[in-house]
Image (tube, helix red, strand yellow):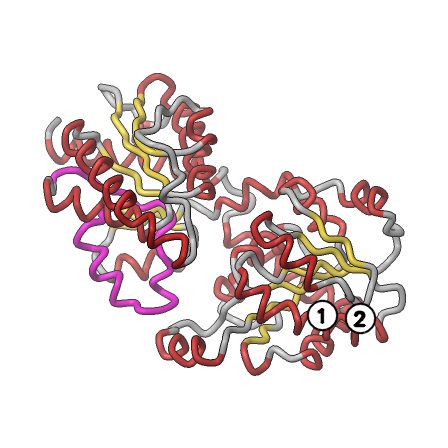
Amino acid sequence: MNEGTALVKPVSLMLISGEPSGDQLGGELMSALKSIAGGGVTIAGVGGRAMERQGLKSLYPLDATAVMGLAEVVPQIPEILRRVRVAADFAISSRPDAVVLIDSPDFTHRIAKRIKRLDSRIMTVNYVAPQVWASRQYRARKMARYIDLVLALFPFEVPFFEKYGIRTKFVGHPVIERAVYMRDGPLLRAQRGIASKAPLLLVVPGSRINEIRFILPVMRQAVERLAKEVPGLATILPAVAHVAQAVREQTKDWPTPLHVIEGEQDRFAAFDAADVALAKSGTVTAELALARKPMVVVYKLGWLTYALYRPLISVKYAALPNLLLDREALPELMQSRCTPENIVAALKPLFLDSEARAVQLESLDEAAKLLGRGEEAPSLRAARALLDFVHAQRLASGT
């Protein structure tokens, strides 16, 4: 334990996640806290299986809050609001040194607002802040009223949030800790009957039904054209459980040998097995950067949704590596540019031009370093930042 985290009395923390991805982060954070502080930290709050494996006794299960889509959310609203009150009121009664709100801002930020309204002395920490820097930046000013510290995943978030008066500490992106699982590509190829030298394209259309609806058909047309340029092309497509059936229905007449896979282990193995990726924008682009996979990034919305959303966007790039590098190191084909012709033109050099591959790999390595690769694990950095924050607050209050 370093000097900044050598606390006289046990640290009392409340961790709150709202869905499985946040639960995973919470579990990693709890493990890191225990490795640094040992028995010098007590943790209560809300979580799922990952956090429970680290010893958390959740105030309630995640089932009501881990929902997505209007049809699913509306019936759960009364229960969600009740759980906001339960979590906030527990914080008020137990008065932890800090409440850590993990992702799921529509849920966790409601809790933070209620806590601050009832007792402004309780410190609130946001781990995985909403991407307000990408659109509707004014929301950061509102966050400053109820968030005391942001544990940032990206280095550019530090000056952004501090501009609005929110103390911010860069801890690195959690995908860094998942890079170790991106292996067993040769084994997956063998299991699926894909020749070791066969050109393999990873296709990632997204995890939402609307993404499958708008993006996958364009990807299919692009693959059909690319197969004429890249002899022996095969494709592999990781699908999450709730869209797997829709993916299989839309890929029945796929133009190349296609392997639809499910499960996180096979997903990461597919990252390792592929030569090139065609991916929708999102966190997967950071994962692919760590896997060192040259890629083309695409996205497409319905025209009305795009017309309403486009004026709110305030960033130049959609792919996370491009945002980090502040240049279009990876081809981005959004909306009207997301056509089969453009996709093929961008993918073809990544298969057939070794220099084009090398240039992009160099950029991916640069982006991965900016994400925190090569540094201490993000969960450990987050744990140290959190303990240092508590220590500073105690010094300031004389407790």
Q: Name the residue tied to disc 1.
A: 220
Q: Residue at x 85, y 43 (%)?
A: 190
The residue type indicated by label 1 comes to: Arg
As drawn, is 159 to the left or to the right of 85? right
Q: Mark 2 points at which residue?
A: 353
Determine whether, in the image, residue 175 is placed left or right of residue 48.
right
Instruction: In the displayed orientation, state which residue is furthest to the front.
Output: 75
Q: Can you tell which quarter of the image residue 220 is in?
A: bottom right
Q: Magenta stretch? A: 121-148
Q: In this view, does 174 lie above or below 230?
A: above
User: Magenta stretch: residue 303 in it?
Assistant: no
Tell which tag, 1 or 2, sits nearer the viewer.
Answer: 1
Query: Which quarter of the image is occupied by the N terminus?
Result: top left
Residue at the spot 67% in from the left edge and 80% down from the top edge? 342
Q: Which of marks 1 and 2 is nearer the N terminus?
A: 1
Amino acid carrying mark 2 in the image = Asp
Q: In the image shown, does 2 or 364 lie closer to the viewer?
A: 364
As drawn, the label of residue 288 is none
- Residue at left offset 76%, top offset 70%: 223
